[in-house]
Amino acid sequence: MAERQDRTALVRALGSAVRGEVEFGTTARALTTMDASNYRRVPLGVVAPRDADDIATALAVCRAHAVPVVPRGGGTSIAGQATGTGVVLDLTRHLGKIVELDAASRTAVVQPGVVLDDLRAAAAPHGLTFGPDPSTHSRCTLGGMIGNNACGSHSVAWGTTADNVHALTVARYGGDTLRLDRGRWDGAPAGLRELVGSHLALLRTGFPELPRRISGYALDALLPERGPDLARAFCGSEGTLGVVTEATVRLVEAPGSRALAVLGYADESAAAEAAAGLLRYRPLTVEGMAADLVREPAGLPRGGAWLFVETGGDTPAEARAHAERILRAADAVDAAVVTDPAGQRALWRIREDASGTATRMPDGSEAWPGWEDCAVPPARLGPYLRDFRALLTAHGLRGTPYGHFGDGCIHVRIDFDLLSGDGVARFRRFSEELAALVVAHGGSLSGEHGDGQARAELLPRMYGDELVALFGRFKDLWDPDGGMNPGILARPARLDENIRFDVLPKRPVDVTFGYPHDGGDFTAAVRRCVGVAKCRTAQPAGADVMCPSFRATGEEAHSTRGRARLLHEMLAGEVITDGWRSKEVRDALDLCLSCKGCRSDCPVGVDMATYKAEFLHHHYRGRLRPAAHYVMGRLPQWLRLVAPIAPVLNALARIRPFAALAKRLAGITAERTIPVLAGETFTRWARKRRSRGTVILSSDQVVAVWPDTFTNHLSPEVGKAAVRVLEAAGRTALHPERSVCCGLTYVSTGQLDKARTVMRRTLDRMGFFLGDPLVVLEPSCAATLRTDLPELLPDDPRAAELAGSVRTLAQYLEEYAPDWRPPRLDRRVAGQTHCHQHAVLGDTADRRLRERAGLEGELSGGCCGLAGNFGFERGHWDVSVACAEEQLLPSVRGAEPDTDILADGFSCRTQLAQLAGVRARHLAELLAEGLDGPAAHRCGN
């Protein structure tokens, strides 16, 4: 009772004093229990301050109530320092302003929530950039980078964050504000100068000299001969001293052009030993990784390990020449110089996604951080890696090292068993032995991500007891009440406490999908999310889709990571206590478009569309569902029933009062127009055509065309066009005689029992088509057949057989009619690649077919925002429009007047028609039109 009263008093005090949001509800707490580490701590609540004064006010209130505070940026910390049991300060929501950017002095003044890529984008027009660039650059914040002293791949050229900070304004626990500058003691907490002055000898001898020493407090920055540099000493303090409210940072000149020398070596030790020798050539980066991290080595030269050495120059020729000098100097097995920006981005993506992809071993087993970023002197990296591999073997562990070879800093995810007591005990033994190994090589326990809870307990092994005791006194001068991020860095919690998996169910949860990549275990599927937060980017990378709802709302709860965190807490049952009935999880998943973008774009393959369907299945079991589930979720059966009276319904839909009533009853948002039903279905047209003998039987090669619900009842012109194209390619196009359905609408609304019934009936009706190539024109239906069908019916071998036969039109033509030449159209196109096709099927064959047909222009990425039933449902209009406005609508509006708009998905075409008044067409329709032209080629060579 007293605890509840204290909490109520705290909430009341914060609510009356802070102008930003004060959120102590279930959702806010559940979203912030974890960062990207192995650790979990449950906070009391979350405060999102509006400005520096709000930060100070929140700190004062928390001190008055003796409640600890945890500053949090992007939440991508790998050592556990962004988790805590008190009040979490969310510095991303309102504090993302670049206050000033002075190109002449090459400085910028930023708030702590500024995302690194935003600062780099603002500096780019001036030929400048911020040097440190961790792989999370698209979502990490400057405040978080200062807290961890983040580095990134370019630190060999531009140093760590601490090397690039001029001054800081920080608020301490209690709310007083200090200004920290270089070369001045002004602003230092009382007693700090005296503490340093009485321990000069220890500070001069106690710190190893290496480029990536991030562990502990940087007290040596306060030595007389080094400044003192209060700002540098604060960097890397992991939120344990105070909260950055504003930072003045250094900008560096960005090269006008860059080139990438990719060097192949026999193994990682050979690559590591070569890395230090390349530093004399002053590269921008020297990154390394071994073959066991690279699942698809396309574009890489021969070798078992590679160095990525980036060079810069004022011109492309100068950058290339620099790279070629390095290539000639390197004793590599094979090498290549990549100057094409797209090629460089593709290679860098392999490296940047490693923090996610490394969490799964090649056999699918899990791997975790914990010893993610030890660093040794670069010249010692080769021997250290050999000893490290030997230590892994001795403990029966596996890992895939990669990282900043030029700085001697190695990242690795290790297949620790963190689910059992014995496994956690081995994790501890290994950690203790690895700490000793790192120190023996003259290294630092942390070379980039900080100590947090993962390594701080072992700092005495690196620094000795006397210096670590001095760290504690340093902390106390800044934070005498001990309210700033307790349990981290100074007087830390044990490295095997607060493991985030401890609260999860010990036995598999009863679920409907098969989860074949997670051993059938839903809990293991949810564990996939390690928190690297690639889903929290403001702009998608290239053709990526994930995560459109986050970009529309900016809310953590509507990111893939946020939803995974809520599912984790649902399974844990501590913060979210009502399991599958949770309204918090339901509300977060409500704005998930089921676009499947995370299935391909998330580095660890989180599949939130599947998790959403699973959750809705359990959430509504035995309960009344939303009206949209009964109408749009069961669309195939309704469309079959009303097909004979389609003209009547179309007429009624044009009567405004009738349409408004129908939409209200069906759960459809008022802003939507009801689509027009086809007067004649595709299957009816095909049957009539066959009965008239107009089917072209020019070949005994028969191909089945899937009569999906959307093509059949809403856009039969797509099916007709596809038949023409297939016949022009010498194929006879047929379709199953009896009604079949992939089950998409049932899956997306979580009606999984019904979905399985429909799927089984479909398998029964496929008859002789089963096993033969199956052309599916609607990408969402193709994705459902390819993935959801075998995952919902894992014990039916016919499901896997049918899934394996699914092809897009372009895939079928490329694979089964390779000699067919499409009509040469020579037109420009714009539009969008369907999100399900991007995520599940890929669009490589479609790109090649468009190129052969002379269709020029790139299709946009992202999601159209309609996403089947999503954009029609009441309450989704704003998000649906925001998703369309992100890429699709601007690309169409910006197209030249004669450009053809391509969209293979019915949802995409409908969204364009309703929001932009544009008629988009399926690729099959453009090709079919071209068959009538003089350049048509209907045969082979």
Image (cartoon, rainbow, N blue to C red):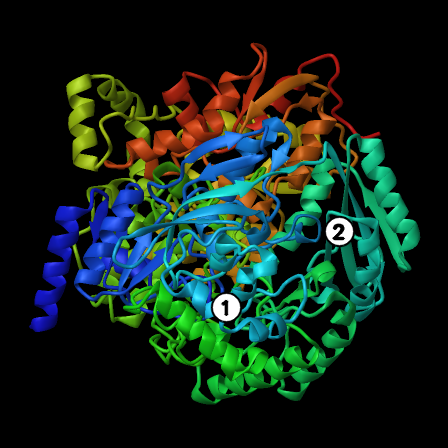
Q: CA distance from mark 2 to mark 1?
A: 56 Å
Crowd tier of the residue under label 1, counting other residues whose Cα lies within 10 Å: few below 14, some 14–19, many 20 or above: some
Going by the numbered disc 1, the residue's amino acid type is Gly
The C terminus is located in which quarter?
A: top right
- Residue 739: give x, y in percent of width and height: 42, 44
Are the two marked residues, 2 and 1, in contact with CB atoms closer than 8 angstroms? no
Q: Does dot 2 land on a helix, a strand or a loop?
A: loop
Tell me where residue 382 appears, x and y as whole percent. Answer: 78, 71
Could you tell me residue 66's position as x and y percent?
20, 66
Question: Residue at label 2?
Answer: 298
Q: Residue at x 91, y 53 (%)?
A: 329
Mark 2 / mark 1, whichever is N-terminal: 1
Q: Looking at the image, can residue 711 be seen?
A: yes
Q: Is residue 25 visible?
A: no
With 49 as the anchor, is 561 left or right in this view? right
Query: In the picture provided, is 219 more to the left or to the right than 80?
Result: right
Q: Quadrant of residue 8?
A: bottom left
Residue 435 found in image quarter: bottom right
Q: Residues within 10 Å of mark 2 (few under 14, many from 20)?
A: few
Position above or below: 600 against 676: below
